[in-house]
Amino acid sequence: MSLPARVRVTRPPLPLAPALRQAAARLCPAAPLDRLSSAALAIAGGAVIGAHLKWEEGEVQAIETGWRGRGIEEALASALTPAT
C-alpha cells in the first residue's frame, strides 16, 4: 500500500531533536523517550502525524485519528524492521 502523497516516513537520529521529541511525547505519552533504541515518524505538511517508537522493553505506535487506515501504520512498522 502506498502512502498519501504528502506523507513521508523518516527515521530521525537519536536522541530526538526537541521539536520531534515534543511531537513524539504528544502522540505516545507513556513512551520512555530518554531510552529509545529506534524511532520512525510520519510527517505530513511539516507536522508529525504518527510515531512508532522502540526501546529495550517494548514499543508503541500512535497515529492521529484522521490519518489512520491509510497505510501509515504499516510504513512506520516497516521502517523499523531490519531488512533481511
Image (cartoon, rainbow, N blue to C red):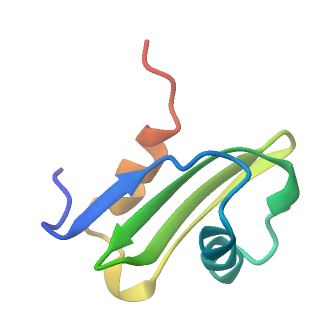
Residue at x-position 38% and y-position 69%? 43
Residue 82 image position (x, y, % from top left): 51, 23
Quarter of image, res 9: bottom left
Residue 6 seen? yes
Quarter of image, res 45: bottom left
Residue 68 left/right relative to 62: left
Residue at x-position 34% and y-position 87%? 66
Residue 12 image position (x, y, % from top left): 54, 50
Residue at x-position 36% and y-position 75%? 68
Residue 33 left/right relative to 9: right
Q: Image quadrant for the C terminus?
A: top left
Residue at x-position 69% and y-position 71%? 18
Residue 74 seen? no
* Relative to 62, residue 61 above or below: above
Residue 35 image position (x, y, % from top left): 86, 50
* Relative to 58, residue 6 above or below: below
* Relative to 10, residue 48 above or below: below
The extreme bottom residue here reads 66
Quarter of image, res 4: bottom left
Count numbered badges in the picture.
0
Residue 19 left/right relative to 10: right
Viewer-side residue, 69 vs 8: 8
